[in-house]
Every structure is written in structure tokens, then in C-alpha cells.
């Protein structure tokens, strides 16, 4: 492997999500160099300047608008470029536009760098993760998407509010597609080791079925609600990008529900979707086969099939 600068990252796409992620990453102190690339170069320049003006309150770092040759020594490349959802539009509707953007971006990256980790954020993130893996030819552990890291954060937040407990004490995963067919792994959910239902009852809640249905719908609909109200979602995903980057740069071996190409877990194969995975300096190290109920496994396989049906139409 060539010598990469482990303190250098690139963000491709500097719209709402790319700029918010760059801002969160600047504050993280994880990197000493960040290059911003956008089809609209002036936009990347504007964001680089604006974000740089916060540096006296953060840690020293070089932030600039660049182009693909600047990627040569970057260890991490975050891709947010692509159209976002319009009000009422599903993530999967974005597929044609954004795959065609990836058909131009990925070869431009591999021309200068074949050793970095590619972190996919643009939607539909599972389809684009699969596309990026195929188009780049990189080892699959180095190409993965933020997947349901954001959905899982939304679930933890909502559960924390519902149960009046710190959301960081909530342990629960959303798995499968980052989108309408995602599933909540309720059977393994717990609050600091106490099974979720027990904690709910401790707080005086006994109608578990209704609560679980409302919470799962709340997570699934939150992007639609935010887009309806303010056109785009970007702060939650920016913090999710920061969290995944932190796990990589610090080689944390954290367990995060990132999206990666699957080869047999729960009988799922040849599609990218989110399962709990150990994430460290080499990217996705291994999938963690948490216990799921039979219904959850069936729903997870159905989610995989939804994505496979979309992939089959994409000629990848
Ligand atoms: P946006 O329209 O604000 O920004 C997209 C940016 O990409 C624009 O600045 C545009 O100029 C740039 N771009 C387009 N084609 C390009 C190319 N070929 N090369 C370089 N740059 C290019 O959109 P947004 O709100 O920032 O959303 C970006 C993507 O992130 C969307 O696909 C959205 O659905 C997705 N998203 C993902 C998550 C997640 O959880 N994974 C969450 C929110 C949004």
C-alpha cells in the first residue's frame, strides 16, 4: 500500500450534507488536512473559506477546495455528491441520477488513489455503496456506506426521549436498507443491559406493540418530515459521518451499522445493506451476527430483496 496521510480526508460533494459533514469533521480534531471537491468549484471554495474561519476556535488544519489530483494521499474519501430527495420522494427514486454521477466520480478517484477508504453517504446509500465497490474494484472492506448509522441514532434519540433516559444508554440497531424497508432489531434492544420491555415497564409503559410501531414509524418518517419542513436533512448525517470517521481514524473497532456488500450473513448475499460491523483503520473488519428473531430475519431478507430488485435494473 502506498503511503497515505492518515490525517487527510476528502469530501466530494459540498451541498447541505457535504458542508455540514465538513464542518463537523473540522470540529472533530481528527484530521489535519481536508480537501473539498464539488462540480460547482466556487461552492467548494466558499465552504472551505467559511469553515476555515472557525479554525481559531478549533485545532490547526488545512482546508481547501481542490480537484481529483489532490486525492492522491488522502486516506479517507467521503462521497456525498448527488441529488437529494425532494418532498415525498423515496431514496430509491434517486438511483438513476446518482449512479450516473458515481460513474463519473469513482473513475476520477481511482485514477489518483486506489488505497483509500471510500465512505458513501449519497442516496440511495446501499445501492451506491454496491456501485462504488463494483466501479472502484477496491477490496470491499474499504468501500462502505453510512447505511443505518443515522437511522439508529434517530431510534436511540426517540427511545431516549420516550423513556426519559440518556440516548447513549440505549443499545438498539436499525438494520437493512437505509430507507423504507429497514427493520428495527427489537429482540436485542436494551437499556444498559436491561431488556427494553423491562425498562419500559419500569417507566410505566406496558403497551409495547403500539410503542414499537410508533417509534419505528417515527424513525422511518423522520427524513420525509424534515425534508417537508426544511428541504434537506444534514446535521444528523453530519454527526453520523463524523462518528464513522472517528472509528476509522482512531482504529476503534467500534460496532456500527454501516452498509457493506454482504456475503452470506443471515443468508443475504450480493447486495449492500447495513448489519452491525466492526469498523477500524481498515474499514469494515467483520460483520457481527447479533441474535435476531425469525420475524426480524425474514424482514431483513425482504429488505435485501427490495435492494436486489433495484440493483438488477442498474447494469452494474
Ligand atoms: P445538495 O444538492 O445540497 O448537494 C449535492 C452536491 O453535490 C451539490 O453541491 C452538487 O454540486 C454536487 N455534485 C453533483 N454532481 C457532482 C459531481 N459529479 N461531482 C462533484 N460534485 C457533484 O444535496 P444534499 O442535501 O447535500 O444531499 C447529498 C446526498 O446525500 C443526497 O443523495 C442525499 O439523499 C444524501 N443524504 C444521505 C443521507 C444518509 O443518511 N446517507 C442523509 C441525508 C442526505
Image (cartoon, helix red, strand yellow):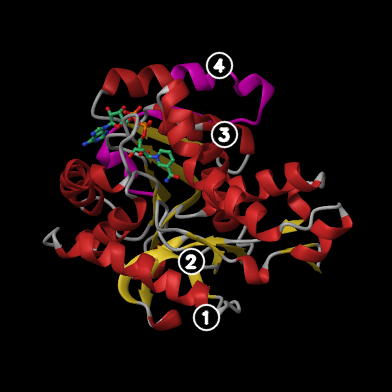
Tell which quarter ligand 1 is in.
top left
Judge whether residue 49 is colored magenta: yes
- Report how far apart the C-alphas of labels 2 and 4 lie in the structure: 32 Å
Q: Quadrant of residue 114?
A: bottom left
* Residue 25: mark in rendering: none
- Report how far apart the C-alphas of labels 1 and 3 lie in the structure: 39 Å
The quarter of the rendered structure image containing the C terminus is bottom left
Q: Which residues are magenta?
A: 48-73
* Residue 24: mark in rendering: 3
Q: Is residue 305 visible?
A: yes
Q: Is residue 22 visible?
A: no
Which residue is under mark 4?
53
Left or right: 136, with 214 as reference point: left
- Report how far apart the C-alphas of labels 1 and 4 lie in the structure: 52 Å
Which residue is under mark 1?
294
Q: Position of residue 175 (x, y in %)?
A: 50, 63
Which residue is under mark 2?
282
Q: Earlier in the sequence, mark 3 or mark 4?
A: 3
| Circle 1 SS class | helix
Q: Earlier in the sequence, mark 1 or mark 4?
A: 4
Q: Earlier in the sequence, mark 3 or mark 2?
A: 3
Q: Residue at x 22, y 43 (%)?
A: 98
Q: Position of residue 260 (x, y in %)?
A: 40, 65
| Circle 3 SS class | helix
| Circle 4 SS class | loop
Q: Residue at x 46, y 37 (%)?
A: 223
- Image depth: mark 3 or mark 4 in front: 3
- Image depth: mark 1 or mark 3 in front: 1
Image marks 3 and 2: residues in contact by CB distance under 8 Å = no
Q: Residues within 10 Å of mark 2 (few under 14, many from 20)?
A: some
| Circle 2 SS class | loop
Amino acid at each position: 500500500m502506498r503511503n497515505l496521510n492518515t490525517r487527510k480526508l476528502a469530501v466530494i460533494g459540498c451541498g447541505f450534507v457535504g458542508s455540514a459533514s465538513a464542518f463537523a469533521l473540522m470540529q472533530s480534531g481528527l484530521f489535519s488536512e481536508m480537501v473539498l471537491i464539488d462540480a460547482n468549484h466556487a461552492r467548494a471554495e466558499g465552504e472551505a473559506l467559511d469553515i476555515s474561519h472557525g479554525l481559531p476556535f478549533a485545532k490547526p488544519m488545512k482546508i481547501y477546495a481542490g480537484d481529483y489530483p489532490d486525492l492522491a494521499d488522502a486516506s479517507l474519501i467521503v462521497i456525498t455528491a448527488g441529488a437529494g430527495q425532494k418532498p415525498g420522494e423515496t431514496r430509491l427514486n434517486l438511483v438513476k441520477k446518482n449512479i450516473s454521477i458515481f460513474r463519473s466520480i469513482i473513475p476520477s478517484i481511482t485514477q489518483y488513489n486506489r488505497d483509500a477508504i471510500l465512505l458513501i453517504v449519497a442516496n440511495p446509500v446501499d445501492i451506491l455503496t454496491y456501485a462504488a465497490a463494483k466501479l472502484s474494484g477496491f477490496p470491499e472492506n474499504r468501500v462502505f456506506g453510512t447505511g443505518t448509522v443515522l437511522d439508529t441514532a434517530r431510534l436511540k434519540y426517540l427511545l431516549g426521549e420516550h423513556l426519559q433516559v440518556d440516548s447513549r444508554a440505549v443499545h438498539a440497531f436499525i438494520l437493512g436498507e437505509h430507507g423504507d424497508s429497514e427493520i428495527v432489531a427489537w429482540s436485542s434492544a436494551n437499556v444498559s443491559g436491561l431488556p427494553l420491555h423491562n425498562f419500559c415497564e419500569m417507566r410505566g409503559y406496558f403497551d409495547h406493540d403500539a410503542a414499537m410501531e410508533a417509534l419505528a414509524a417515527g424513525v422511518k418518517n423522520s427524513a420525509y418530515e424534515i425534508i417537508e419542513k426544511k428541504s434537506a436533512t444534514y446535521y444528523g448525517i453530519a454527526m453520523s459521518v463524523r462518528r464513522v470517521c472517528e472509528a476509522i481514524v482512531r482504529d476503534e473497532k467500534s460496532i456500527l451499522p454501516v452498509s457493506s456488500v454482504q456475503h452470506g450473513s443471515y443468508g443475504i448475499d450480493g447486495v449492500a445493506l447495513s448489519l452491525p460491523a466492526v469498523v477500524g483503520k481498515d474499514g469494515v473488519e467483520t460483520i457481527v451476527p447479533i441474535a435476531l428473531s425469525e420475524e426480524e430475519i425474514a424482514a431483513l431478507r425482504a429488505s435485501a430483496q427490495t435492494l436486489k430488485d433495484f440493483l438488477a435494473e442498474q447494469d452494474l
